[in-house]
Amino acid sequence: MEKFTVLDLLQLDLKEHDALNLKCVGGRPGLIREIKMPELNRPGLALGGFFDSFAEQRLQIFGRGETSYLCKLEKENKLENIKRLFSFKLPCCVFTNNLEPPAHFFSLAEESGCPVLQTDLSSSEFSTRIMRVLSNIFAPKKNVHGVLVEVFGIGVLIQGESGVGKSEIALELIERGHRLVADDAVEVRCVGGNFLMGKGVNVIASHHMEIRGLGIINVTHLFGVGAIRDKKQIQLVVQLEEWDTNKSYDRIGSEDSTIELLGVAVPYLQIPVKPGRNIPIIIETGAMNERLKKLGYHSAKEFSRSIMNWLETERARSVYFETQ
Amino acid sequence: MKEKIVLVTNRAGIHARPAALLVQTASKYSSSIFLERNNEKVNGKSIMGVITLGAVYNSEIKITVDGEDEEKALEAIVALFEKKFEEN
């Protein structure tokens, strides 16, 4: 992974419930400092002079408690602990609730080149938001080849050899009112160990598609903003392949096959492509079937079970008739 | 054209899984394959057809195969019945 600096954190485009509302109030040269781990620290103990196991690599959060303690230290002119604090190469200090850092603290921070940031959020709200943001950034990621489309609310990653018609199929799905997340290059992140988030590798290119014979098209302009999405959880992987007569395809679907992506098992469908097969409709149905499974109704298993029951009663009856 | 009468020897009868196995085997051959039980005749390459036969344990099934590779096809299908569709 590339270095993630404090400046990168400030420049993240975060909206609504993710917004961090951070601004830099001092120590600007330190903005190139790297954030190495998605973790936080409340430096209360360190300010009290206890530096054992001090988490120096973490973001340091100063809330009301820490800030009033800093003010008390200033009044009493006890600056050793603050000096010692800045002898560590802290990634940055964040003051929540729009609190102003005391003057001495501020100048010591400037001196050591440690960036001082400020946010209007409360400490706990800021903590949950930044944890979410950082764990997304530090989540394991992988770029995969394929098209990510949202079909009936299910994130479907369509994969297959180039030329099998992924983009055309995605286009047809968009035509039918579904949404394009990314074409060709999809960035997959594993969030929280069991959740796969997919989005376009490149923000500029992700809502464009290349269609053989047409060239590059802009999906947003052609189909409207309703036809696109920024990111979507990957809930189904569809593998398209040329129909192979020697290969047997799943006929019942009672055994759920999955594929591993970054250690997460995702439902997986292998769909053979042949001229005259309407793949978009098959994908739509697959997505709906996936939703049905999530609701607890597994069509193939239910079918299998009722057939078994039926055969069982038939057999019981035949035994009865034979004995007569 | 070749014909053979076989017995369903697996306890559960021909339910979804054995039916899929049968259809997949049948689809490998170009010959036309029909299964018959109680005067009901279905295409051996159609999964829904095979299931609706209601072939329970110990029922008799007449297999009719017609085409170029009929011998091989019949052999393969009979083998499935003999193996109890890899069940029990």
Image (spheres, rainbow, N blue to C red):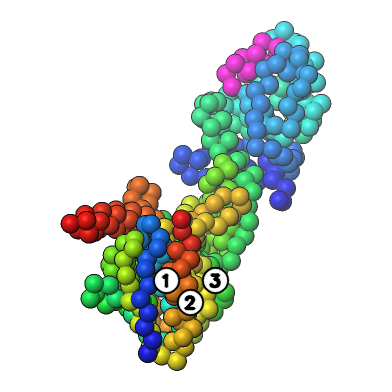
Q: Position of residue B35 (x, y in %)?
A: 33, 76
* Badge nearest the viewer, 2 or 3: 2
- Residue pointed to by mark 2: B76
What's the residue type where badge 2 is placed? Ala
Distance between the alpha carbons at the discs numbered 2 and 1: 9 Å
In terms of secondary structure, where does tag 1 sit? helix
> Badge 2 sits on which subunit?
B
Residue B12 lies in the magenta-colored region: no
- Residue at 62 percent across and 46 percent down: it is A139
Front residue of A14/A195: it is: A195
In terms of secondary structure, where does tag 3 sit? strand
- Residue at 68 percent across and 21 percent down: it is A43
- Residue at 54 percent across and 45 percent down: it is A194
- Residue pointed to by mark 1: B22
Please provide the residue range marked out in magenta: A63-74
Residue sitting farthest toward the top: A76
